[in-house]
Structure formats: structure tokens, C-alpha cells
Image (cartoon, helix red, strand yellow):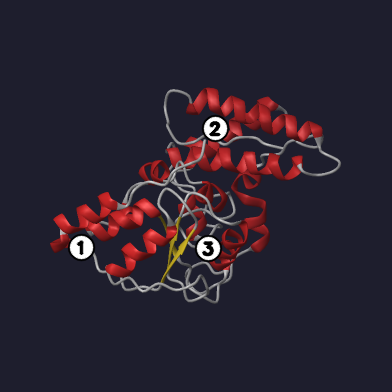
Amino acid sequence: MTRRHASILIPHWMSKKIDAIRYEHRDQTSVIGDYPYLPSEVEIFLTQRGVPLQPLDEDTATVVLGQECQQPDLRKIKGMLIDSAHESPLLYSQEMFLALLVTGKDPLDEDDDELDRMVANYESFAFLMDPEFEWPFPLTLTDGAGGSIDAELLEIGFLRWLGYRVGQSGKRADERRPLLDQAFEEWEVLPDEFPEYYRRAWGASGSARRLKKIADSIAHFRFLHGRKLERPREAIADWESDLLWLYKKRYKDRFQFRWPRIDD
């Protein structure tokens, strides 16, 4: 069955009804990807409201993403997020940005759980929200105070910092899982050794964001190693069993964010 686009007539109607509080967006904006609205219709809607549009490049301040985007565009956006020479762009879904223009209220001001629900059906955000590119916080190569950060520490990550290891040279399940419990509920915020944007990306202890970060990290490790020609089978089995354990103990009947899938 052919997928159909949503009609943009309703946002048009809403903007006319509450035009007095319409938000005026003056940043250079790029519209990337398709669905739920046609990108051409989104561009017309934005142009009629004075939003300056441009192709995606280093000067783009705001990116409006469709549910489906071309991989080259997504890889370019990822590069923009970690380019320390330029300010990272803000990322909005089509619906989020239209809501901003119509109501004047910025969806990025919502809490983490609400943001996760807003983009639950967006493959583009699923790609950009992997453990190394947490949305909506921009990544930099400084600690926010002008100092450099420990690149090796970031490569290791919080779970490894706690001592979480899998596979032949790793820890047993009864040793790993207390560390996952500790990561989820004992650290109100991450240690100061990590830069502020990284600590913020993990959220508060016991939160949906914290659990999602842990689960996404483990799923990402499993995905990367699962693509190797010589797959570390014991490590993969450990990651999969830990994800299932987390799902049953922490996620089921408590949270609604999308649990990570494991695909080879």
C-alpha cells in the first residue's frame, strides 16, 4: 500500500486562527527529508511566514527533519553536530517546527520524555539520537569553560568508566548488572570528569532519559560488534542478555519510550 502524506491544510488553518501570536523565526533554516508532510509544502508554509530557507550547509542554524531522510544528509548533519568550529544546529521534526511557528511555544523546552514521544516515529531522529550524538544537545570538543576534554574518556564512556565489561575478558552477569543498576539510579549526575553536555545527555538518575541512554549504549555496542566478520559471540550474548534484563526490571510497565531494537 502506497504511503500517503498528511495534509498541511490544518496547520495553515491554525496559523490563520491564532496569527496574533505567531512566532517569527529568523534563523537560516533547512528542510530535510519527507513525511508526514511533503517537503515542498513545508517549505511553502515556512516561506509564507518569513522563515529564511537555504540548502543544508555549515551556516544552517535550524534543521527541520522529515521522518525519512537520505543517509548523506543525515551524515552531514552528524558532522555539523560535532564540528567544534561552528555552532551546532537545532533539530526539529516537521510537526515540532510547525507547532513552534503557530503557537510561539518551543517544543525543545519540553522535558526529555515528551521530546522522545514527539519523535518516536522518526527514523531520522533514531539515526541521530545514537549514543554518540545525543539530541537535542550539541556536541563540542571543549568542556564549556574553554578547556579541552579527555577524548579517551569520552570514547570509553560512562558505563566503561563504572567498570562495565562483557565477553571473555569481561565480568559475569551478577557483576555487570549491579553496575547497570548503579548507572541508572545511584549517580544523580555523572562525574565531573565528563563534560557538561555529556552529563546532560544522560539525564537524572532514575529518569526515562537515563534508562534510554543505558539501553541505547548497550544496543549500539552490540550493533557495531555484530557487524564484524569475526563476531565476539560471548560479548554479543552478554549485551543481549543485559538488554533483556534491563527491559524486564526497569522498562516494562514503567516507561513508554521506544526500546532499542537489535538488528544485525
Helix, strand or loop for disc 3? loop
Question: Which residue, as the protein is rendered here, is positioned at the far right?
Answer: 230
Quadrant in the rendering for residue 42: bottom left
Q: Tag 3: residue type?
A: Leu
First reached walking from the N terminus: tag 3 or tag 2 = 3
Q: Tag 1: residue type?
A: Arg
Question: Where does residue 252 sit, x and y in percent of width and height?
Answer: 48, 24
Answer with left or right where residue 43 lies relative to residue 141.
Answer: left
Answer with left or right where residue 232 lies relative to residue 86.
Answer: right
* Quadrant of the frame with the C terminus: top right
Residue hosting label 3: 139
> Mark 3 to mark 1: distance in Å?
30 Å
Q: Tag 2: residue type?
A: Asp
Could you tell me if residue 140 is visible in this image?
A: no
Quadrant in the rendering for residue 30: bottom left
In this picture, is 42 found above or below 28? above
Q: Nearer the viewer, residue 31 or 10?
A: 10
Question: Where does residue 2 sit, x and y in percent of width and height?
Answer: 51, 40
Foreground label between 3 and 1: 1
Helix, strand or loop for disc 1? loop
Helix, strand or loop for disc 2? helix
First reached walking from the N terminus: tag 3 or tag 1 = 1
